[in-house]
Amino acid sequence: MHPALSSGPLSAERAARHPIHPAISKLQNVRIPKPSMSPRPPTADANATQDWNDEMSGLFEWLGLAAMASQRLQANDRVDPYVAVYANPEPSFIGELTRIRWTGLLSPAFVRAVATCASTFQPTPSSNTFVGLTLHGTPHTPLLNPVRVPRPDGEDSVSLLLSPAVPPAKGKAAGRWAAVEAVGKWDSRFG
């Protein structure tokens, strides 16, 4: 073992385990979008691609506001258009939103288990249910694919929307999904 690791702040004796518990909150009377989750159109159709990008941007903006429990999502929210220009994605409905949040250093196995649970969720046939996951990493960690150098102004975020097939189709994918990642101010992409 390296001498620097046998004593000091990185030594095994100073390691501590911090339990992480979910914080569960329910938001009532919020506008919830009904995502179409349509496949990305061919790049040859510029108008359709722009419409798809706008729809996805709106959905992921909504997901970010939901992660923060923003009052902009409330059905009775009437914001002055000179103060804020947010508009909820349409079509939408008024309903209840459940937000489950973990904060801390989470293992990849735990994150994978949460994503697997979310992807296997089967709503009732009449529901307009979807699942959104947002993960914020440490911006000072090097990324391997593609290789990126950490920057003080960087960010490391991934958001995933999962819309289960209702009713589930036999022999087909369980539903639709869309993802967006951001690793810097000018560096984000949809998947």
Image (cartoon, helix red, strand yellow):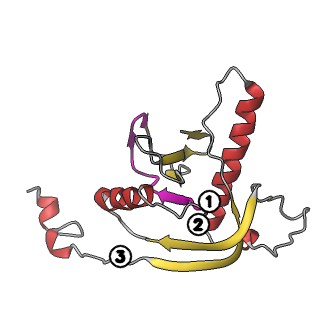
Kindly identify which residue carries mark 2.
67
Q: Are marks 2 and 1 in contact (CB under 8 Å)?
A: yes
Name the element at disc 1: helix
Q: Residues within 10 Å of mark 1 (few under 14, many from 20)?
A: many
Between residues 60 and 34, which one lies in front from this camera angle? 34
At mark 2, the secondary structure is: helix
Give percent across and percent down for residue 2. Answer: 11, 55
Q: Position of residue 78 (x, y in %)?
A: 86, 72
Magenta segment, which residues?
Answer: 128-147
Q: Amino acid at mark 2?
A: Ala
Q: Amino acid at mark 1?
A: Leu
Numbered mark located on residue 20 in the image: 3
Residue 137 is covered by the magenta coloring: yes
Q: Can residue 137 be seen?
A: no
Residue at 66% x, 47% y is: 36
Residue at left 81%, top 73%?
A: 77
Which disc is residue 63 wearing?
A: 1
Return the residue found at the far top: 44
Q: Quadrant of the N terminus?
A: bottom left
What is the spatial separation of the Cα atoms under label 2 and label 1, in whole angstroms? 6 Å
Is residue 157 magenta-colored? no
Q: Position of residue 133 (x, y in %)?
A: 50, 59
Q: Earlier in the sequence, mark 3 or mark 2?
A: 3
Q: CA distance from mark 1 to mark 3?
A: 23 Å
Q: Relative to 147, is 176 on the left or the right?
A: right
Q: Name the foreground residue: 188 vs 88.
A: 88
At mark 3, the secondary structure is loop
